[in-house]
């Protein structure tokens, strides 16, 4: 006879607050990381590195499970357990035998439910995602044994406070049709990244200040987050992020990178390597491929694209505008927007395999021989649309050795430079942008267009994702050319075989990237391993100061200019209004350093800045902030003791 499960009625729960979590941090910090002799001592407020804090929190949660205080009937619920993603929660309890938890966050309709399943264990860490903000959420919990039988069942409510107003309602219009892709994450150009369900409701968000690049999905299921609370000033006087975190969707930070160079929006990962687009020199942008070792934070290889294609194409600063890059079996597929080309590069040999482009682009160049021949159904050459005209995105859908299938998003702009059209010949534009599915025959160096679908015209930030069975395409257009009411961007589902438009959502915000929101729930069920080596990279040291300080002001530092000085590991973090502070001095008894901020572009809002202290010599330093031709002395000092 089949065993009936136990319906848990009048079950209880205990909830931890933010202050409870902060107490856990203080209680267990020294247990996780042995107290070491500090190099930097100061009365300035201390800020724990986020990668260390995540380890301390996980250690504390394991200690709670060690005490066997909570059961399936009496749960411990921890909202926003790592302090960075308020639409998440963690449930802790113990069971007498190995079971797993299957849960469902009830959506407004069944197709908007968020589901998760944990691993078999007696020590249960149940990561809950997909919660609505500003309401009580109903969660259906089932305890399942190794025979697949539900042995206990209960309903639970978790309240989430309202999310930020600027991301609360991101959808302008929605046809409310069934989605084949579930939840979609939008990397908004301004504000927090958000995940929306089929109804357009926000079901995930991050509570950390980030920039336009925002979240960058990685192949290991994590993402790289741009941390806008720590910036530097680039050679052009522009405020640029310098701190990046490898994170998961629960808000756990695994590694932190301090980088002195800008990472562009074209990024891909393979194994321990991160490939990204940056600048080859001070006069050009978006034309160097760099490989970063994720275990050391060091650049291990780079390739300047003009060395592959020829110097004659490098005629102005953003001459290539690489909008997307993808790693495939030792090759890098790059979308070279202003060259109207998709280029496949053998990364180990640093040579081109093939190019998809209008033949006229590369005629007479050293890479003309790599241009694939168009074997599509022949049409009148005067009516033929070039294969690429401002391509925004190209990705491999299938890879069968010499035969490949790729999907291409073509913006279809008329490209001009110095008054001349850069894509000569044929019909140069259409009213709309195009999504193309292309078959490539590498052996015969040819391609054929399998399917071509028109979509609303885009300016930039467009991607094309596909379902696992490749029957459906998700076309994400982050910046439409023509705004329709409150709609700045759009998402469409398309039948890959027919081009039929099945589902559409209009978005109020511009977004720079989009992908399927598919958290690895089982990965979050285990605690992070203790690791002291989680900070990689290095910021440029400050210059030594040997001059004379400007006159000392009798007034306190004005918060309009500068404030919130604090120490985070070997960084001095502070908030400044860019363009108003001239210099920051660190004056010691025998040594002095200066951070020059005089040529920073003015921005009428405060930004966070990071100043490295790791190269300071042993001394006691007083901090002075210069603005309005005076210096203002901060009340706290910084002591470097070893």
Image (cartoon, rainbow, N blue to C red):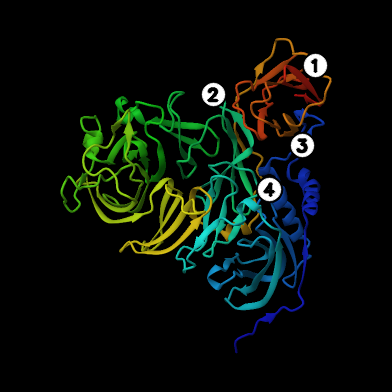
Mark 1 neighbour density, 10 Å: few (under 14) some (14–19) many (20 or more): some
Q: Is mark 3 on a helix, strand or loop?
A: strand
Q: In which quarter of the image is residue 585?
A: top right
Q: Distance between the residues labelled 4 and 2?
A: 34 Å
Residue drawn at the location 67% of the way across and 77% of the way down: 152
Between disc 3 and disc 2, whose residue precedes? 3
Residue drawn at the location 34% of the way across and 33% of the way down: 350
| As drawn, 346 above or below 201 | above
Query: In the image, which disc is placed on residue 46?
Result: 3
Indicate left or right for 72 with 273 as reference: right
Tag 3 and tag 2, C-beta contact below 8 Å? no
Which quarter of the rendered picture does the N terminus lie within? bottom right
Which mark is nearer the camera, 2 or 1?
Answer: 1
Mark 4 neighbour density, 10 Å: few (under 14) some (14–19) many (20 or more): many
Which mark is nearer the camera, 4 or 2?
Answer: 2
**Residue 258: where, in percent of width, then height?**
60, 34
Q: Nearer the viewer, residue 51 or 513?
A: 513
Which quarter of the rendered picture does the C terminus lie within? top right
> Which residue in the protein does label 4 denote?
54
Between disc 4 and disc 2, whose residue precedes? 4
Between disc 2 and disc 1, whose residue precedes? 2
Mark 3 neighbour density, 10 Å: few (under 14) some (14–19) many (20 or more): some
Q: Distance between the residues labelled 3 and 2?
A: 30 Å
Tag 4 and tag 2, C-beta contact below 8 Å? no
Residue drawn at the location 72% of the way across and 51% of the way down: 57
Query: In the image, which disc is placed on residue 235?
Result: 2
> Which residue in the protein does label 1 denote?
552
Which mark is nearer the camera, 4 or 3?
Answer: 3
Q: Is mark 1 on a helix, strand or loop?
A: loop
Indicate left or right for 14 with 405 as reference: right
Indicate left or right for 485 with 9 as reference: left
Q: Which of 241 and 165 is in front in this view?
A: 165
């Amino acid at each position: 006879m089949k065993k009936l499960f136990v319906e848990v009625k009048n079950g209880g729960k205990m909830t931890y607050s933010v202050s409870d979590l902060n107490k856990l941090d203080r209680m267990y910090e020294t247990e996780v990381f042995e107290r070491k002799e500090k190099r930097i001592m100061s009365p300035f407020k201390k800020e724990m590195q986020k990668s260390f804090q995540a380890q301390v929190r996980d250690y504390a949660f394991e200690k709670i499970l060690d005490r066997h205080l909570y059961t399936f009937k009496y749960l411990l619920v921890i909202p926003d357990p790592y302090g960075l993603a308020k639409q998440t929660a963690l449930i802790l309890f113990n069971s007498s035998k190995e079971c797993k938890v299957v849960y469902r966050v009830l959506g407004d309709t069944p197709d908007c439910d968020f589901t998760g399943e944990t691993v078999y264990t007696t020590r249960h860490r149940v990561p809950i995602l997909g919660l609505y903000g500003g309401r009580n959420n109903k969660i259906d919990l089932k305890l399942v044994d190794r025979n697949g039988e539900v042995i206990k069942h209960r309903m639970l409510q978790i309240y989430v406070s309202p999310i930020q107003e600027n991301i609360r309602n991101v959808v302008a219009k929605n046809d409310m049709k069934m989605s084949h892709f579930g939840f979609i994450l939008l990397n908004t150009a301004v504000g927090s990244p958000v995940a929306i369900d089929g109804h357009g409701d926000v079901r995930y968000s991050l509570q950390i200040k980030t920039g336009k690049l925002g979240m960058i999905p990685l192949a290991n299921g994590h993402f790289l987050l741009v941390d806008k609370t720590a910036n530097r000033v680039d050679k052009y006087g522009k405020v640029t992020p310098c701190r990046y975190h490898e994170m998961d969707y629960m808000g756990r930070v695994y590694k932190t990178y301090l980088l002195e160079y800008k990472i562009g929006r074209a990024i891909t990962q393979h194994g321990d390597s991160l490939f990204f687009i940056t600048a080859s020199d001070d006069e050009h942008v978006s034309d160097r491929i760099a490989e970063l070792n994720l275990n050391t934070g060091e650049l291990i290889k780079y390739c300047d694209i003009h060395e592959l294609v020829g110097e004659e194409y490098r005629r102005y600063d953003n001459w290539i505008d690489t909008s997307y890059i993808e790693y495939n079996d030792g090759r890098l597929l790059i979308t070279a927007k202003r060259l109207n080309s998709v280029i496949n590069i053998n990364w180990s040999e640093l040579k081109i395999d093939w190019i998809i482009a209008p033949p006229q682009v590369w005629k007479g160049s050293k890479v003309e021989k790599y241009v694939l021949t168009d074997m599509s159904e022949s049409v009148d050459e005067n009516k033929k649309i070039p294969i690429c005209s401002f391509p925004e995105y190209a990705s491999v859908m299938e890879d069968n050795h010499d035969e490949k299938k790729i999907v291409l998003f073509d913006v279809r702009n008329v490209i001009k430079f110095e008054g001349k059209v850069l894509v000569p010949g044929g019909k140069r534009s259409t009213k709309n942008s195009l999504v193309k599915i292309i078959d490539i025959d590498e052996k015969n160096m040819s391609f054929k267009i399998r399917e071509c679908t028109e979509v609303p015209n885009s300016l930039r930030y467009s991607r094309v994702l596909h379902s696992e069975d490749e029957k459906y395409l998700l076309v994400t257009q982050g910046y439409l050319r023509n705004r329709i009411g409150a709609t700045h961007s759009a998402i469409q589902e398309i039948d890959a075989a027919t081009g039929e438009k099945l589902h559409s959502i209009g978005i109020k915000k511009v977004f720079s990237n989009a992908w399927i929101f598919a958290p690895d729930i089982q990965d979050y069920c285990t605690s992070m391993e203790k690791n002291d080596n989680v900070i990689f990279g290095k910021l440029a040291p400050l210059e030594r100061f040997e001059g004379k300080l400007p006159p000392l002001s009798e007034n306190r530092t004005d918060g309009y200019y500068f404030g919130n000085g604090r120490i985070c590991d070997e960084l001095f973090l502070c908030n400044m209004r860019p363009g108003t502070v001239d210099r920051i001095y660190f004056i010691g008894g025998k040594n002095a350093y200066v951070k020059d901020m005089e040529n920073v572009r003015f921005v009428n809002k405060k930004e966070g800045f990071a100043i490295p202290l790791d190269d300071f010599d042993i001394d006691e330093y007083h901090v002075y902030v210069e603005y309005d031709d005076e210096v203002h002395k901060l009340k706290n000092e910084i002591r470097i003791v070893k």
